[in-house]
Image (cartoon, grey):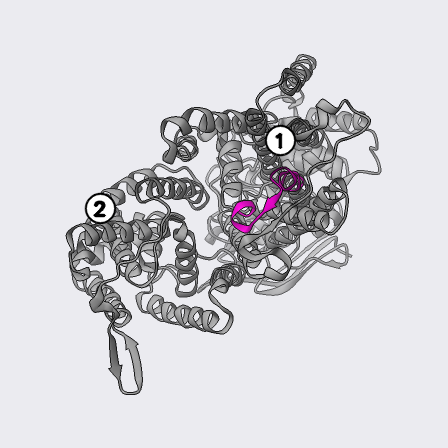
Amino acid sequence: MRSGLAALLGMGVLASVPPALGFHPYYLFLLSTAFLLAAVASAWNLLAYAGPISFGHAAFFGLGAYGAALASLGGLSPWGAIALGGLAGAAGAAGVGLLSIRLRGAYLALGTLACAELLRGLALIWSEVTGGGAGLAGIPALPVLPWLPRVLTEGRAGAYYLALALLGAALGLFALIRRSRVGLAFAALREEEERASLLGLRPLPWTLLAFALSGLVTALCGGLYAHVVRVVEPDLVFSRHYSILPLVMATFGGLHTLLGPAAAAIALYLLSELVLHPLLPALHQVGYALALIAVILYLPGGLAGLRRGGRRAHP
Amino acid sequence: MALGFSMILGVSRSLNLAHGDLVVLGGYVGYSLWAAAGLSPVLLLPVAALALAPAALVWDWLLKRTPEPKELSSLVLTFGLSLLLQTVMRAIWRGEYRLIAESSLGASLQLGTLALNRGRVLAAAAALAVVGLLWLALTRTRWGQAVRATSIDPQAAALVGINVDGARRSTFLLALGLSGATGVLFATLHYVHPAAGVELTLMAIVLSIWAGVGHLRSVLAAGLLLGMIEALTVTGWGPGWREPVVALMLLGSLLARSGGLARGHAH
Amino acid sequence: MPILEGRGVSVAFGGLSALRGVDVAIEEREVVGLLGPNGSGKSTLFNVLGGLLRPTSGEVWFRGQRITGGPPWVAGRLGIGRTFQIPRPFAGLSVLGSVLVGVTFRTRHRYRRAADRRAEAERLLGLVGLADKAGARAAALSLGEMKRLELAVALSSRPALLLLDELASGLSPKGREEVVLFYARLRERGMTIFAVEHSFGLLAQVADRMLVLDQGQIVVDGPPPAVLASPRVAAAYLGEEER
């Protein structure tokens, strides 16, 4: 545990270096996106730790993005806007979580997918508020923090550190939960819901909590993303990519583990962008698909967490 | 198209989230053949159906190997396959929208006071014909009965001596063939683009829930109903409403049946 | 007043009747056995009594409260504990963790500090002889060990009534002897037990009373000697080893 912590801190320090070294802004942006994806993957993993496999995390990402964008354009400071977006995502996630009253396993997953598609469609339609297909533009950039060296918070560097901080927070949250009562409840409900409820655990409050936390982190990432690219549109932030990528990354990296999803996220994303994209520009997304298929078929151990819901054969 | 989906569900307890994408693939293949060789759309149907045969074998092979619980693993797997298909299609055909715009299809047919688009009528007729053929094949031939038996209870079917693997493979070939053919029909009516698959898959799922696995006639009826709801939505509220309405219906159906898709298996 | 009472419990699946008008009343501190041939509805009855299954008709009361049809946590919080015939370990948890669940969430007020909870969990493991396996993964145990874990987990919520589903099945003769010992020790501690077993002989050693289920109906209800002598029971399948 000690050495793990030290390694983690070491990586954090290492990760803090690039902007200071004056990396090209494109690479900073790339890494920032990688960190955000890693954070979302971790958030997805947190929900999966409690049981539900979500096919609709894009809904929370988009809620956070749009929430933050609207708040920011409405005059709120970017920090407040992102926080507000985060809350919107948490609330939306809890709403989606209500599906778990009736649905489990694959059908709950389908339900989350339907919710994400629903939100995307609504964002396209509700033009007065969301700007329809064109979305919202001109979102203010993240402000420079006066009490930190300018180089740390300006432009791409600022976004970089924020993304890194969000990733750290996501990982920290997962680590804390895993060692706490909450984590115990999550794991028990995930593995044997009936038995856990016989022991007095009511599934719904815990499931909703898991959804809300996962949605919160994801939405915060969405809000940050909105302020970095400064444009939100339905096909961008409610894109199915934000639903499938966390799933792929988390399962590939190791479901329910602390660092697996984040590490896989960064690795897969950078691989896809830096290696595959130049080589096979049109096909670079294939890497994710293949990774997923490979994991499902050949690494069942990593998918032990998928064993949830309804009827199951017992050992 | 929904038939194919529920057949796959019945035979392998797998939810094929890539189903719609396969349809789109069929549409693209059909389009390319039409654009390149000028084949009549009627011919395109079987050709596209056959073109998807290799995919059917791949799907069968992959889905056989998914671990328990089948419904969830297959869902995740086909989610990945869906991404794969979409990426590949986007690579081959770019992101542009394509339409099989035969001039003969654009003409109007007069039916009393209704002026119908000839293309749509033909497409509907073709769809009915295909389903009708399928129904005949499934109910009148021995092979068809074997397939149906396997989709209801693979283990019982095996006990009775039916070649379950063969029946499975046939089912997949059939299902994906249907998808391919549907794709061609689809391409004559709507623009095909790589991301159109998800909506189709969702519709297939809704229909499968409404009609239950394997009930041919119910699927037809449900399809009609869904089509009407869709048309009403589009004319009443605008085309952008179609996707959210389908999503909403999926939610509603899921909640109403609360995950009972794979049960209620009977024919 | 009986601590657990079921009246007119009937369960029908499709066309099949699993239980027909079953009446059960268990007094506090009683050890009651349930016997019956396979398919007679024993597990179904357990599921209904534990609030896991809603009967087609009939009611179940525990400590005077209606628990018919669940939800399961109501029965659990009122004080029912249960083992499963085919063990259902918390596969992702350790042995200690499995027991911690009940301790953490049912006995919150008694064990406020994490260290206390851990100690209690270890005590429970010691009771069933799994103390040395505390760190092992719950899914990696042998059948006998898993059954012991089942018992420990059931006890972790400090229940007043234990529903034990074939604790002794699949065990070696030595294992079965240990199970008899467990029954005795639990009884000493004042636990109320309703247990299903295949073997009449085993139950006869520990039970005050036995119920015999046949095709969904209770055919005999009485102390072991009476049950043994009953012709109706002889007619139903009793259990091969001890007759």
Left or right: B206 as drawn, with respect to C133 = left
Q: Amino acid at mark 1?
A: Leu
Check the picture and name the quadrant holding the C terminus of chain B. Answer: bottom left
Q: What mark, if any, has residue A49 been given in the picture?
A: none
Q: Is residue A120 magenta?
A: no
Q: Measure the alpha-carbon separation of dots 1 and 2.
A: 51 Å
Question: Which residue is located at x 29 percent, y 56 percent?
Answer: B183
Residue for badge 1: C149
Residue B112 can be seen, yes or no: yes
* Quarter residue C89 falls in: top right
Residue segment shown in magenta: A220-238
Q: Chain of mark 1?
A: C
Q: Which one is nearer the viewer's eye here, C227 or A147?
A: A147
Q: Is residue A231 magenta?
A: yes
SS for dot 2: helix
Check the picture and name the quadrant holding the N terminus of chain B. Answer: bottom left
* Quarter residue A99 falls in: bottom right
Question: Which residue is located at x 71 percent, y 22 percent?
Answer: A151
Q: Is residue C156 above or below residue C78?
A: above
Within 10 angstroms of label 2, few (less than 14), some, or many (20 or more) residues? some
Left or right: B267 as drawn, with respect to A311 = left
Main SS, magenta region, reads: helix
Q: Is residue B234 above or below residue B47?
A: below
Residue B203 horizontal/vertical position (percent)? 41, 59
Residue A200 can be seen, yes or no: no
- Residue furthest to the bottom: B112
Residue for badge 2: B53
SS for dot 1: helix
Left or right: C13 as drawn, with respect to A123 = left
Residue A256 horizontal/vertical position (percent)? 58, 31
Q: Amino acid at mark 2?
A: Ala
Residue A105 horizontal/vertical position (percent)? 52, 47
